Image: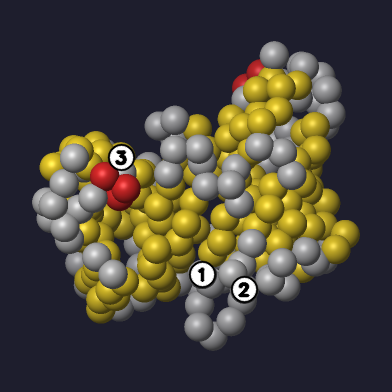
Amino acid sequence: KNEVEQSPQNLTAQEGEFITINCSYSVGISALHWLQQHPGGGIVSLFMLSSGKKKHGRLIATINIQEKHSSLHITASHPRDSAVYICAVRGGGSNYKLTFGKGTLLTVNP
Amino acid sequence: DVKVTQSSRYLVKRTGEKVFLECVQDMDHENMFWYRQDPGLGLRLIYFSYDVKMKEKGDIPEGYSVSREKKERFSLILESASTNQTSMYLCASSFVGHSGNTIYFGEGSWLTVV
């Protein structure tokens, strides 16, 4: 069973700061997801990646398959980025089973 | 835009009641999932369905059953609700394809069992 660890658990930043959230996993994977959950519950998929780097607006996700590690970066953070960010991995050979990290609560103050 | 709709956002039920949580997706996805989310535990898979009438148990299926009679609809059933099933329930769906399995979630259903 894959273990997914996220750090930090909680992160408070000032508006405009550069933010990094980390995710490590224990077993080889076929894909990694970064998800965002706002208060109230709904979850949105930000990225799905299996190698390299992806960018969408102010968000950048990277993955290092050899080191079993991924990072989510937010540039020029804004209070509306405040949310829980969740890392989830899909094991090799599995077409559906995701293992989730416990999430990182990000608060961006104005 | 893909839409995953959960029929009830907030429910309060009594111990022993039968509870139905409904989920509908509009993108013809093969895969549908039910998760529960509890503080400190993250998301845990209850059941998964990869086609109509097909289902597989997830990590915590005890006390739950599911139904998938139509491709777009996946129902979670609590046969006899108990207080330890108080939680937030999330439905999700994904497409099986060569481009991978981007997953789409509903807004969540907050269930309180009293």
Screen quadrant of the C terminus of chain B = top right
Specify the quadrant of the image occupied by residue A71.
Answer: bottom left
Q: Tell me residue A79's x, y (percent).
A: 26, 45
Q: Name which residue type carries label 3.
A: Leu
Residue hosting label 1: B102
- The chain under label 1 reads B
Chain under numbered label 2: B
Residue at x-position 54% and y-position 85%: B98
Q: Identify the residue at the far front of this view.
A: A110
- Tell me whether marks 2 and 3 sit on the same chain: no
State if disc 2 and disc 1 touch (CB < 8 Å): yes
Q: Are marks 3 and 1 in contact (CB under 8 Å)?
A: no
- Of tags 2 and 3, the one toward the viewer is 3
Q: Earlier in the sequence, mark 1 or mark 2?
A: 2
- Would residue B5 be found to the left or right of residue A69 on screen? right
Amino acid type of disc 1?
Thr
Q: Seen in the image, is A105 located left or right of residue A48? A: left
- Residue B110 screen position, x and y as percent: 62, 32
Secondary structure at numbered mark 1: loop
Query: At 59% across and 69% down in the image, what residue appears?
Result: B1
Residue wearing tag 2: B95
| Residue holding disc 3 | A105
Which chain is home to disc 3? A
